[in-house]
Image (cartoon, rainbow, N blue to C red):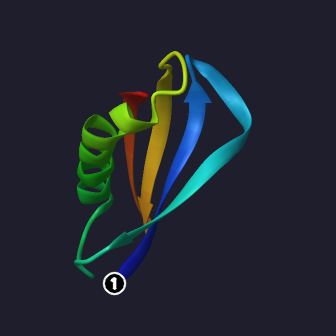
């Protein structure tokens, strides 16, 4: 398993002073940040409906797998 991270950098276009960091574990030791971004997007699209606490917001994120990075924006 490979340890990776998602950083939530901004909400609705407003940069966070202290980004939220989510630790993520990838089963493939050769996975890239793009693969992490895909997995996290699938997770958000399939599972956040169970967490519906309030209004959804656009979140700008960065996926980190070692030195590899990938930017993504998701609404949740």
Residue 56, compared with residue 40, is above or below; it is above
Q: In front: 72, or 69? A: 72
Q: Number of marks in the image?
A: 1
* x and y percentages locating residue 46 in the rendered image: 25, 40
Q: Local crowd at mark 1 within 10 Å, few (<14), some, or many (≥20)?
A: few
* x and y percentages locating residue 33 in the rendered image: 33, 58
Q: Residue at x 59, y 29 (%)?
A: 10
The quadrant holding residue 76 is: top left
The N terminus, quarter of image: bottom left
Q: Which residue is mark 1?
A: 1
Residue 24, compared with residue 56, is above or below; it is below
Q: Residue at x 39, y 30 (%)?
A: 73
Specify whether 70 is left or right of 30.
Answer: right
Q: In front: 44, or 64? A: 44
Element under label 1? loop
Residue 36, compared with residue 16, is above or below; it is below
* x and y percentages locating residue 39 in the rendered image: 26, 53
Outermost residue, right direction? 17
Q: Residue at x 47, y 19 (%)?
A: 56
Q: Residue at x 31, y 57 (%)?
A: 36
The quadrant holding residue 41 is: top left
The quadrant holding residue 18 is: top right
Residue 45, compared with residue 56, is above or below; it is below
Specify whether 73 is left or right of 29.
Answer: right
Specify whether 27 is left or right of 49.
Answer: left
* x and y percentages locating residue 5 in the rendered image: 49, 61
Q: In front: 32, or 59? A: 59
């Amino acid at each position: 398993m490979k340890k990776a991270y998602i950083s939530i950098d901004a909400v609705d276009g407003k940069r966070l002073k202290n980004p939220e960091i989510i630790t993520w574990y990838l089963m493939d030791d050769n996975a890239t940040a793009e693969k992490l971004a895909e997995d996290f997007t699938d997770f958000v699209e399939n599972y956040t409906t169970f967490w519906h606490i309030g209004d959804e917001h656009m979140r700008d994120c960065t996926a980190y797998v070692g030195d590899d990075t990938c930017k993504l924006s998701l609404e949740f």
